[in-house]
């Protein structure tokens, strides 16, 4: 309950005057106001309110009308925003693109691989002498040389989908296409003869040559 403290105290035999009465009222103070003391129709304007700066004083359920936020209100930190790809209901997934460079390895029957970010993509430095049937750094080449895997360990976030893959540059004499998929969060590229069903050995077609494969993919983060 609110407490009113009088602004003037009269002595027992003191003469009451209009000035003293005014002081009694005008100098009085009110303290201890609680919610029950404020009428429902009080309509207190926001100019009488202090800025709210204490954490957790405003519930998220009380925030509405985001469309009316002024342009000068600032930017919500990226970390506080859920990110969705259109058509995907899983938050946090990222669209990335990178250039996979395949060159002739220094050792015989090997290739040299590099992954370069194009947009928001991952990057893996030059990895030489990627041999058949072995994992070298973040790259694995199968025994036939027809399947090149970018290991999940070399990527940020788990790869969950391939949007596209295409040959961007190819100095070899063979036309081939990269059939690219996700296997256990690895990016897997199978090299097929163009307009055919047979696979090709990357160590053979990259001998003395250079091949760029552009890959657009989605990761979990």
Image (cartoon, rainbow, N blue to C red):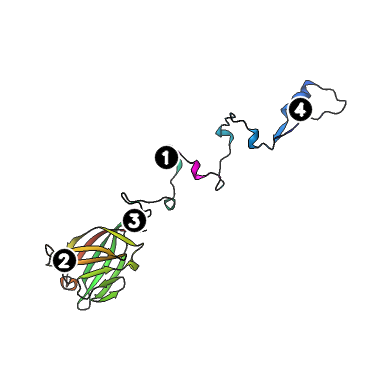
Compute the Cα span from label 3 to label 4: 69 Å
Residues drawn in magenta: 55-66
Please tell me which of labels 2 and 1 falls first in the chain: 1
Which of the image's four quarters has the N terminus?
A: top right
Check if residue 60 falls in the magenta segment.
yes
Number of labels in the image equals 4
Q: 41 or 166: nearer the eye?
A: 41
Left or right relative to 57: residue 32: right
Q: Which residue is mark 1?
A: 71
Q: Earlier in the sequence, mark 1 or mark 3?
A: 1
CA gap, disc 2 and disc 3? 28 Å
Place of residue 89 in the rendered image (x, y in percent of width and height, measured from the top left)? 35, 51
Give yes or no for contact between labels 2 and 3 (Cβ–Cβ under 8 Å). no
Residue at the (43%, 37%) spot, across then down: 68
Determine the residue located farthest toward the right in the rendered image. 13
Binning the other alpha carbons within 10 Å of mark 2 as few (below 14), some (14 to 19) or many (20 upward) gives many
View extreme (bottom): residue: 108
* Residue 194 vertical placement versus 78 (above, below): below
Dot label at residue 192: 2
N-terminal of the pair, mark 1 or mark 4, is 4
> How far apart are labels 1 and 3 at the CA level?
26 Å
Question: Which of disc 2 and disc 4 is earlier in sequence?
Answer: 4
Question: Which mark is on residue 24?
Answer: 4
How crowded pointer 4 is (Cα within 10 Å; few <14, some 14-19, many 20+) is rated as some
Residue 184, percent across and down? 31, 66
Question: Where does label 3 land, which residue?
Answer: 94
Q: Nearer the viewer, mark 2 or mark 1?
A: 2
Q: Nearer the viewer, mark 1 or mark 3?
A: 3
């Amino acid at each position: 309950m609110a407490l009113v403290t009088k602004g003037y105290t009269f002595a027992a035999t003191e003469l009451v005057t209009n000035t003293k009465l005014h002081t009694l009222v005008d100098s009085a103070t009110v303290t201890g106001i609680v919610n029950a003391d404020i009428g429902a129709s009080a309509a207190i304007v926001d100019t009488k309110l202090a800025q709210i700066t204490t954490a957790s004083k405003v519930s998220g359920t009380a925030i509405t009308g985001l469309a009316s936020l002024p342009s000068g209100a600032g930017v919500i930190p990226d970390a506080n925003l859920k990110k969705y790809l259109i058509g995907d209901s899983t938050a946090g997934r990222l669209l990335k693109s990178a250039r996979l460079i395949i060159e002739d390895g220094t050792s015989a029957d090997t290739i040299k691989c590099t992954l370069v970010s194009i947009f928001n993509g991952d990057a893996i430095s030059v990895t030489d002498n990627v041999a058949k049937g072995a994992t070298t750094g973040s790259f694995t080449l199968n025994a036939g040389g027809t399947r090149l895997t970018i290991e999940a360990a070399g990527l940020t976030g788990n790869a969950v989908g391939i949007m596209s893959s295409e040959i961007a540059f190819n100095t070899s004499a063979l036309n081939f296409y990269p059939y690219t998929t996700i296997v256990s969060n690895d990016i897997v590229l199978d090299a097929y003869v163009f307009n055919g069903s047979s696979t090709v050995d990357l160590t053979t077609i990259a001998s003395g040559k250079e091949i760029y494969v552009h890959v657009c993919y989605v990761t979990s983060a």
